[in-house]
Amino acid sequence: MTTSAGPPPRPCSTAWCWPWWPTDIRQDLPRVGTRKLLHVLHPQLGEHAARVGRDYLFGLLATHGLLVRRRKRRVITTQTYLPLFLRPNLIEHLVVQQAEQVWVSDITYVRLLSGWSYLSLVTDLYSHKIMGACLHPNLSVRGTPTAVQQALAGRRHPHRPLIHHSDRGLQYAAREYVGLLES
């Protein structure tokens, strides 16, 4: 039977006194989570195993500062040099009413076994259809023009005016990229 996390446990005098076992295990396995820790501790708890459940162990470890903190992994994909990006926001109050009226571009990162790769996307704002995409091994300017070329080649209504919107990344201010959009 699992008990809920209640008040912090009092110091104990029994052979299975907390928080020494979790501390010893954490020294050997510093990133082991609470659920796996409970599994490892279960045989050692003996007669007390039925009283110590997952939620109780979470509370116990939190009380003693033994919870594993999550690592924050972020990859910065926007590299900005502001003087290049003094362009007005054309879609701020625009109501999009049809496909191929506004395209938005962005770069996201993808974790692979060999490291990070970067996915450049061009998306139609009205239909949410991905018009162009390119997976590139780095954040160089070469990945974004490929996605735009793919998007331009797949246009169904090339005669309609088109607004392109992106963040202020260096990849979107490159001459090759801007040249493709202006042509």
Image (spheres, helix red, strand yellow):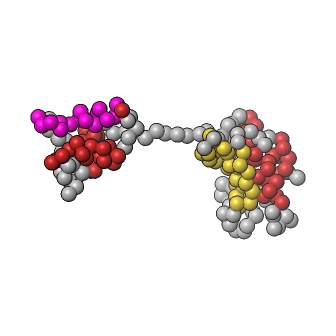
Marks counted in the figure total 0
User: Seen from this angle, which residue lies furthest right?
Assistant: 183
Question: On the image, which quarter does residue 7 sit in?
Answer: top left
> Residue at 17% across / 36% down in the picture?
17
Please report the bounds of the magenta region as a residue range.
12-27
> Residue at 25% across / 36% down in the picture?
21
Q: Position of residue 42 (x, y in %)?
A: 25, 47
Q: Is residue 18 magenta?
A: yes
Looking at the image, which is closer to me, 137 or 87?
Answer: 137
Q: Is residue 128 magenta?
A: no
User: Seen from this angle, which residue lies furthest left?
Assistant: 13
Q: Is residue 42 visible?
A: yes
> Residue at 70% across / 68% down in the picture?
97
Q: Position of residue 142 (x, y in %)?
A: 78, 43
Q: Is 108 on the left or on the right of 60, as rendered?
A: right
Q: Position of residue 134 (x, y in %)?
A: 73, 51
Instruction: Say above or below: 119 vs 114.
Output: below
The quarter of the image holding the N terminus is bottom left
Q: Is residue 65 visible?
A: no
Instruction: Say above or below: 106 vs 25.
Output: below
Looking at the image, which is closer to me, 182 or 21?
Answer: 21
Q: Is 169 on the left or on the right of 46, as rendered?
A: right
> Residue at 31% across / 35% down in the picture?
25
Q: Position of residue 156 (x, y in %)?
A: 81, 67
